[in-house]
């Protein structure tokens, strides 16, 4: 049948339900639990109530077998039409795949051992007016998967699994930190100054206060105020917003974890994030050997999360690419970039040219976890300078699966140096200097370690998703 014919048939069935005084969009229906839970605790002879979508229907005359499903699983139900009143049998005939049904019945096992519910009562809970995607073929169109995520979740078990795992990953991160006495806090998402990172913000206006506000690009400067206020361990799982490009690894709205630990340093934060990710992987994925597979199920790459993770200085990693790199002048570095196949804007600063080498030839090629430590101070304006070499800062960048997952710092708590660093960062845009943060810092912030973790990227790594859009339920898209 053509789609228009299918829609017409379903609307006709809707009218027939109404004619029979049946509410096609139901109401409250008390259940014994989610379908997966009922199935896992299945006991023959037990009376249970479940509700879900009809996802399969096997018509055997007077014997009708259907599958009811929700995100937790499916359970077969058995309806004997001879046991129904003529009116109930007619109503049953108006049901379609995709309709929501509530049933009460007795648990039994079929001859093949399939857990099944012998239906004694049923209620129509919602009539579906459009046919659902074929469960055997799923939703292959990427545009539909992202724009109509509900269809993707209904038809593609791989997508459901990713988002269930995402929820579990966040829960395990939260549990891991709270067990270690970190306090979960909330900081403003609308800020008068977009600080804590170098990024283009989204701008809005508050009418009552008549002020411009920015959606936060990072919560860092507010979380550090809490260290000043005496909170020794804080974290926030937050939404950040950056008005920048969209790509396989970037979405304008994304989720980050930030955590701060008074009296710690970047090395302790590296220990913390290493233990955290390994704990989450073992509890949610069940292994530290992460396999990424293609659509046919073939292994594309393997990531080994087994501890200990490698730690290497930024400069040493650059020397692994070119032993003489730091002895070269600017023009020689640009020429070497051309030889290595790295495209570089010739107007970049020297440290930015070096960073291009790092990103293209080290970061993008690192699958297993790698802590890159002691970066140039120009790259990280909020970190503490190294005592032995003031041109460097005590930080790490955690690289996994070819992309940065988590930076960690020994946090800069000297208000005078911090002011100068921020002045250097804002340049002539002096109005973007966060005086409130600097005022807090002048009241004294303890030495501390801090870290950030990109939740979306971590989910991509642990589940094998290839695009950030595959791990965000409703990614931003251009309007149709």
Image (cartoon, rainbow, N blue to C red):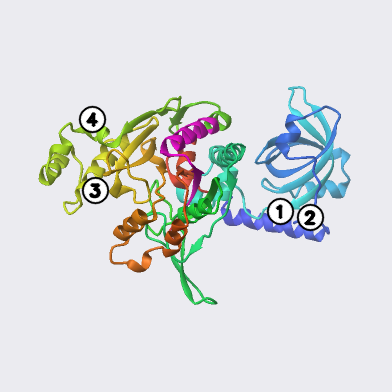
Q: Position of residue 368 (x, y in %)?
A: 39, 29
State yes or no: residue 263 in magenta.
Answer: yes
Under circle 1, the secondary element is loop
- Do the residues bearing badges 1 and 2 touch, measured as CB atoms within 8 Å? no
- Residue pictured at 39% horizontal, 49% vertical: 412
**Quarter of the figure with residue 80:** top right
Q: Which residue is mark 1?
A: 127
If you read the primary sequence from the N terminus, does the residue marked by circle 3 or circle 2 appear first? 2
For label 2, the crowd category at 10 Å Cα-Cα, with few meaning under 14, some 14 to 19 and many 20 or more, is few
Can you name the residue that lies furthest to the front here?
A: 443
Q: Answer yes or no: is residue 141 visible.
A: no
- Residue pictured at 11% horizontal, 43% vertical: 329
- Do the residues bearing badges 3 and 2 touch, measured as CB atoms within 8 Å? no
Seen from the viewer's position, the closer of residues 148 and 474 is 474
If you read the primary sequence from the N terminus, does the residue marked by circle 2 or circle 4 appear first? 2
Q: Which residue is mark 4?
A: 320
State the mark number for residue 411.
none
Q: Which residue is mark 2?
A: 27
Seen from the viewer's position, the closer of residues 151 and 31 is 31
**Quarter of the figure with residue 441:** bottom left
Q: Answer yes or no: is residue 108 visible.
A: yes
Q: Which residue is mark 3?
A: 352
Seen from the viewer's position, the closer of residues 204 and 116 is 204
């Amino acid at each position: 049948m053509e789609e228009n014919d299918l829609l017409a048939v379903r609307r006709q069935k809707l009218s027939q339900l109404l004619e029979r005084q049946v509410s096609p969009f139901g109401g409250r229906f008390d259940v014994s639990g989610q379908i997966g839970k009922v199935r896992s605790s299945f006991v023959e002879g037990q009376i249970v109530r479940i509700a879900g979508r009809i996802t399969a229907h096997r018509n055997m005359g007077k014997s009708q077998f259907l599958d009811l499903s929700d995100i937790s699983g499916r359970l077969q139900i058995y309806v004997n039409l001879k046991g129904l009143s003529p009116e109930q049998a007619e109503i049953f005939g108006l049901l379609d795949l995709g309709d929501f049904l509530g049933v009460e019945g007795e648990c039994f096992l079929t001859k093949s051992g399939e857990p099944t519910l012998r239906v004694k009562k049923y209620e129509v809970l919602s009539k579906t007016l459009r046919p659902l995607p074929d469960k055997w073929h799923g939703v292959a169109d990427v545009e539909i998967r992202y724009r109509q995520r509900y269809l993707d979740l209904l038809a593609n078990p791989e997508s459901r699994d990713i988002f269930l795992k995402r929820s579990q990953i966040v829960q395990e991160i939260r549990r891991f930190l709270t067990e270690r006495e970190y306090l979960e806090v909330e900081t403003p998402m609308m800020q008068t100054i977009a600080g804590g990172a170098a990024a283009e913000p989204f701008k809005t206006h508050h009418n009552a206060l008549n002020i411009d506000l920015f959606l936060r690009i990072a919560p860092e400067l507010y979380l550090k105020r809490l260290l000043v206020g005496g909170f020794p361990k804080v974290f926030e799982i937050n939404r950040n917003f950056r008005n920048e490009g969209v790509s396989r690894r970037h979405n304008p709205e994304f989720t980050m974890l930030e955590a701060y630990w008074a009296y710690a340093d970047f090395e302790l934060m590296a220990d913390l994030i290493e233990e955290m990710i390994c704990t989450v992987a073992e509890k949610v994925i069940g292994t530290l050997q992460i396999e990424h597979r293609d659509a046919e199920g073939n292994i594309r790459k393997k990531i080994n999360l087994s501890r200990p993770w490698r730690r290497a200085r930024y400069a040493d990693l650059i020397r692994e690419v070119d032993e003489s790199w730091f002895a070269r002048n600017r023009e020689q570095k640009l020429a070497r970039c051309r030889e290595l196949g790295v495209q570089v804007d010739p107007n970049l600063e020297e440290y930015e040219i070096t960073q291009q080498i790092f990103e293209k030839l080290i970061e993008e090629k690192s699958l297993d976890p790698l802590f890159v430590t002691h970066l140039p101070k120009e790259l990280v304006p909020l970190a503490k300078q190294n005592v032995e070499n003031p041109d460097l800062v005590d930080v790490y960048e955690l690289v996994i699966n070819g992309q940065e997952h988590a930076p960690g710092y020994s946090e800069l708590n000297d208000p005078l140096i911090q002011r100068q660093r921020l002045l250097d960062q804002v340049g002539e845009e002096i109005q973007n200097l966060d005086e409130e943060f600097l005022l807090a810092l002048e009241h004294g912030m303890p030495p501390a370690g801090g870290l950030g973790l990109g939740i979306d990227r971590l989910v991509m790594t642990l589940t094998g998703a290839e695009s950030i859009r595959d791990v965000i339920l409703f990614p931003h898209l251009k309007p149709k």
